[in-house]
Amino acid sequence: MPQGLDDSREPVWIRTCFVRLPDGDVIAAFDIDGRQYTEPGQAWQVYREAWKEMSRRRAGWEWESHLATPSEPPSRRPSWEQYRVDLDAKHPLPSAD
């Protein structure tokens, strides 16, 4: 059974962040997959961090969440940790003008 999907833990969520590109298209940019974290509440902390950072950058974004199922394969999208590596290039901070 994949990590995080046993009966002894809270439900495991997968949160997908969709971002609006400069041309107006919306893409699924990254996932926060609760199955990747071993400590209870860790995925929620990562979600809050990502939410705050995307808000600070005023990036056009929205979230979609669903419960992970035992048969669901791992996401092919980057994790938040991978996505944020070049966040300044993707979503620069707004100017103070």
Image: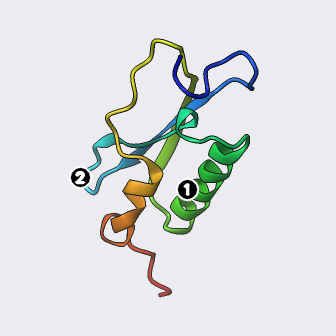
Which amino acid type is shown beneath numbered disc 1?
Ala
- Residue at position x 61%, y 27% in the image: 4
Point 63% across, 40% down: residue: 38
**Does 87 sit left or right of 63 as displayed?**
left
Residue 76 percent location from the top left of the image: 32, 34
Residue 50 tag number: 1
Residue 67, by quadrant, is top right
Disc 2, SS: loop
Furthest residue in direction bottom, as rendered: 97
Residue 23, numbered label: 2
- Disc 1 element: helix
Residue type, numbered disc 2? Asp
Q: Return the residue found at the far top.
A: 71
The image position of residue 37, as x and y in percent, is 59, 42
Q: Earlier in the sequence, mark 1 or mark 2?
A: 2
Q: Is residue 3 left or right of residue 60?
A: right
